[in-house]
Image: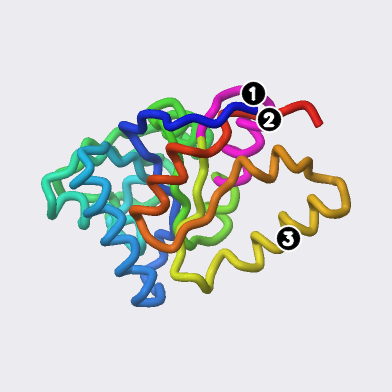
Amino acid sequence: MEAANRKIDTVAVFCASSSSNDPAFVELATNLGKHLALEDMTIVFGGSDAGLMGAVADGAISKNGHVVGIYPEDTFSRDVRHRGNVDLRLVSSMHERKAMMYQLSDGVIALPGGYGTLDELAEVLAWTQLGLHYLPVVLLDTGKFWGKFVEFLDDATSVGVLSQSSRHLLGRAFDPERALQLLRALPLGVADD
């Protein structure tokens, strides 16, 4: 397992598109977008103007950031596509959306979300574990969302169904600056246990 202070130019952000989010999550998403824009990083996201997705994009756009939206045109209503200053790329499926997000990104930050966010998160980690790509992943929250998920992973490690090196592929942060620091420092792959 190799750790590095790697260059991160493009960050994929996984998060909820639901509009009924905790205001603290919306603020965190907006601040993440602003922070990444001010760090001159491209954001790759799901292309929606709703929920945390919209907040991340709007935050970045407010600071003249570059935002790329990957939107599965036959899956969702056209009325939730982000209409702001976003490089919106239409794809035909959720699978194509995820593959393009991974391909365009140097790392991943996951904000609070539901099944879609968990799907993206599990897949990107599994693909890194298998060596199909090497994307560092950080969970970002206010301290009250990802805790039980982290406990689940720690339990999976303690009973031996998740290796220690695989567990270390995922970091957790409570502010955008720390999330970016972790992306640059997380292991680049899995060591043989």
Helix, strand or loop: magenta stretch:
helix
Q: CA distance from mark 2 to mark 3?
A: 19 Å
Name the residue that disc number 3 marks: 152
Say if mark 1 contacts mark 2, CB within 8 Å: yes
N-terminal label among 1 and 2: 1
N-terminal label among 1 and 3: 1
Screen quadrant of the C terminus: top right
Name the residue that disc number 2 marks: 190
Q: Which residues lie in the magenta part?
A: 121-135
Screen quadrant of the N terminus: top right
N-terminal label among 2 and 3: 3
- Identified by mark 3, the residue type is Phe
Give the percent coordinates (x, y) of residue 56: 29, 55
Q: Is residue 97 visible?
A: yes
Foreground pick, 175 / 17: 175
- Identified by mark 2, the residue type is Val
Residue at x-position 41% and y-position 65%: 18
